[in-house]
Image (cartoon, helix red, strand yellow):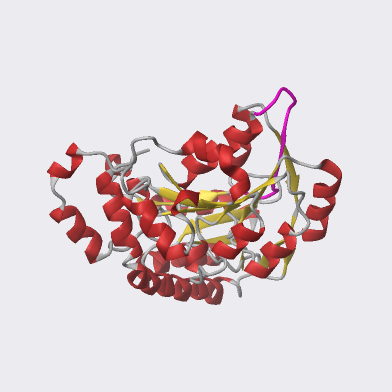
Amino acid sequence: MNPSDNPDLIFLDRNEYSYEIAPLIEQTIRSFSPKEFTTYTRCFQQGIKSELSRYLGALYNVPETDVILGYGGEDILKSVIHCFLSLGHQQRKILIPAYSWWYYKSIAEEVDGQTLMYPLYEDGYDFKYDIPEMKRLLREEKPDMLLLASPNNPTGNSLQPAEIKYILSAVDEHTIVIIDEAYTLFNQSDISYIAPLIARYPNTIIIRTFSKFYGLPGLRLGFAFMGKSLQPFLKFSTKYLGYNKLSEKIGIAALQSTEFYLEKAALMRQDKALYQQELNPLDGFKVYNSDANFVLIKYPIALKEKLQKAFADKRIVVKFMNEDGLRTHLRITLGTPDINKQVIEVLKSTHLNS
């Protein structure tokens, strides 16, 4: 359903962005000259793939040749899985989190890949990866690919750089590791670990996007940093004549506006704390800690129909989870403070009147 078809609906089920965009982005769009579309973005004379990949390489201290751009982070994700799971005649395996974005499994199935899942477990108000079990599966199953999502959707848990290194130290050099960091900047602004990580573990690719933290899902622009062992993917993914000039300039403007978006992330953290403060005292409710732009909430399943009606009456769309192990949970995208207060009131009033 397109939001423009239902302008009165508040969509909190897709982890989109509710705040205003950075002023520099709007200025960049308004000042862009259509004449720039008359040339390609790739510059063979300078030996660069694009203006944005060069900027990202300098910002993250990664060689520009090891920077990948794509039509959103999910395009890079899909391309790298297709590239390596479709090799050879034998069915190949990918190891993914048990509670995670449904699309991971779907991508693998598109090339007849076999999906294995490593578990997460609940620890107080957190979900955590079961790293010992992950290591056992790596050792016994010898998967062709391992996918880490940090933060993970829908559970909101993330891995610290030291934990990522610990996991990678147990991975066979022939296993390709994908680290999906679509949401990471909401909680982790340090980027200094990325360059040494892919240098130490060249079988690794780290994928990021402009869709979440930078609030530009409609731009469809993602980027990644890959280790030297993934050179086949470089040929598979690189656009010979470059990318979209306007998108690249908007991407650079977004990167230059990081401080602006860090302020919005701070507001979201305040509202995550408000969700916990208001709902955790209610019987049957539990708001988990989240390092992303959404909250996962456990609720009394007996209230499901009443909650669905209450949200529909308020024209608010949230995601009622239906995966095994999460059927009593809601995932709610963080809106503006006013919207978040409306959501909390729906949950509290439905509980009070039950």
Q: Position of residue 297 (x, y in %)?
A: 58, 61
Q: Position of residue 239 (x, y in %)?
A: 40, 36
Question: On the rendered structure, is 110 left or right of 3?
Answer: right
99 drawn magenta: yes
Q: Quadrant of residue 199?
A: bottom right
Q: Position of residue 14 (x, y in %)?
A: 45, 49
Q: Is residue 331 above or below residue 351?
A: above
Asked whether 225 or 319 is in front, the reply is: 225
Over which residues does the magenta segment extend? 87-100
**Residue at x 35%, y 53% (from the top left corner):** 52
Asked whether 118 or 137 is in front, the reply is: 137
Q: Position of residue 275 (x, y in %)?
A: 51, 71
Q: Residue furthest top?
A: 89
**Residue at x 38%, y 35% (from the top left corner):** 240
Q: Work out whether residue 314 can be spotted.
A: no
Q: Quadrant of residue 257?
A: bottom left
Q: Quadrant of the C terminus?
A: bottom right
